Amino acid sequence: MSDPSTPRALTTDPFDDDKLREECGIFGVIGVNDAANFVALGLHALQHRGQEAGGIVTYEPETGFNAVRKFGLVRDNFTNLNVINHLPGSLGIGHVRYSTAGSKGATQIRDVQPFFGEFSLGGAAIAHNGNITNADALRRELIERGSIFQSHSDSECIIHLMARSLQKTVPERMKDALRRVEGAFSVVAMTRTKLIGVRDPLGVRPLVLGRIGEEGWALASETCALDIIGADFVREVEPGEMVVVEDDKLTSHHPFERKSSRFCIFEHVYFSRPDSSLGGRSVYETRSAIGEELAKEAPVDADLVCPVPDSGTPAAIGYSRQSGIPYAMGIIRNQYMGRTFIEPTEQIRNMGVRLKLNVNRALIKGKRVILVDDSVVRGTTSRKIKEMILDAGAAEVHFRIASPPTAWPCFYGVDTPQREKLLAATMSEEEMCEHLQVDSLKFISLDGLYRAVGEVKGRDADAPQYCDACFSGEYPVAPADQIEKGFTLKAAE
Ligand code: SF4
């Protein structure tokens, strides 16, 4: 397999805006001319799920498997005809990443997915969104048994487990491999003739199925990636389901013991794009409902409701609608500032959040402002935004947060600071309010969040309907590797 990738590592993001980061987006198509173009567009729509690097693998009978993996954005790497021409075929998969699991130290190009394995029965490529929570133990075992790893990525374990399986087809080998894996995984994979999609038994990370015309199929992390290529949304891949498409025929398999779904509730709050839909409802609508619930739970007398852009916008609209307090764009985001702004000087770095956000002074001056944000992680950005609003002459600043306090790290494919760095891990709501020096600070309750995402009775404490571990500390899959490294579960505190 040829791979003309560029070995270049990015510097760390100097404009870190203090958010949890989804680590990956995945996409795959079969049954279309020039699959690489479709994959590039799909990945472009999923760019919010990972901006560090991306890769595409395609298959064409004459040239076999072809791959391109590059650091940087999809639009900078995969719009070039020289690159796309290197990826012929009607079947392809791709991956965008923003990762920590494979980047202990600087990320290497070999950590960039999709990964490829050549087996006795033919090759297969896989792209994974999520995190394998027993990857360290699996890796040790595989290395002891002779496997030679190419990358630091936990996802590579799947390829080695497949290589060791004695099954006769790639899907059967993949089932064997994934039964050994713990944690969260949505996977798209391909052989020479098949497109495969799998979700872990709890369905923690998303994966949807789409139809392109009468002969093509697509798999994507989110529906917005189907929209961009004009595919029709068919359905979500079910938790614990494997779908295999070959010769325009789709078969569904259930290789794991059936479990109740524990989809990531934070996808509703922040990770997914607002124009995607989850569980049959638009993400935008859900976020507005979160804002309405927040206004019911945490009202305050004020003059304006302003979102912290862009992720706080739908919740701020909901808060304004419910409270009757006017909505205003009090903070404007510079859409063109971001991770492509390379190598800033120390002086520019110190400007921090002002490079990305600016206050609309004429609106803010003398007003009591409610700022709606999706979450508070370390609190560093919240504090800077509060200072900007006060500098602009606001009379009062009230923070309203569209998620409960983030007090626990995520081990299921989301980049989270260590627990002690999370503001809510060490402070109560009152202490956080004091720390941020705002007039008031309120988070939506966990029950309120569940109601807003459509669970009218709130959270079922005995059998929670979602993964909410970063709020509750109740991990639906024990993070085995982390526990081995000394992480203490809530029950053991
Ligand atoms: S811990 Fe939080 S971010 Fe991670 S999967 Fe669960 S709900 Fe999502």
Image: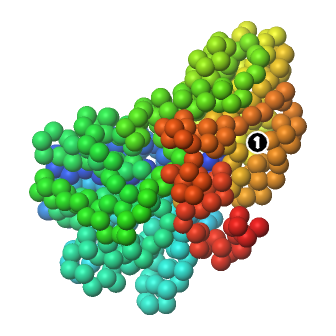
Position of the N terminus, as image quadrant, is bottom left
In the rendered image, the vertical position of residue 396 relative to residue 362, given as above or below: below
Q: Which residue is mark 1?
A: 379
Give the amino acid type for the residue marked by disc 1 in the picture. Answer: Gly
Within the image, what quadrant is residue 304 found in? top right
Where is residue 159? Give x, y as percent: 37, 73
Can you see residue 10? no
Is 432 situated left or right of 297 in this image? right
Report the residue at 71% width, 59% height from top: 418
In the rendered image, the vertical position of residue 481 relative to residue 396, given as above or below: below
Q: Nearer the viewer, residue 102 or 187?
A: 187
Q: Nearer the viewer, residue 189 or 318?
A: 318
Where is residue 455? Give x, y as percent: 50, 41
Q: Nearer the viewer, residue 422 or 345?
A: 422
In the rendered image, the vertical position of residue 147 relative to residue 28, given as above or below: below
Report the residue at 53% width, 84% height from top: 140
Position of the C terminus, as image quadrant, is bottom right
Within the image, what quadrant is residue 44 found in? top left
Report the residue at 17% width, 62% height from top: 193
Report the residue at 31% width, 82% height from top: 165
**Considering the numbered disc 1 on the image, is that residue within a helix, a strand or a loop?**
loop
Is 366 situated left or right of 59 in this image? right
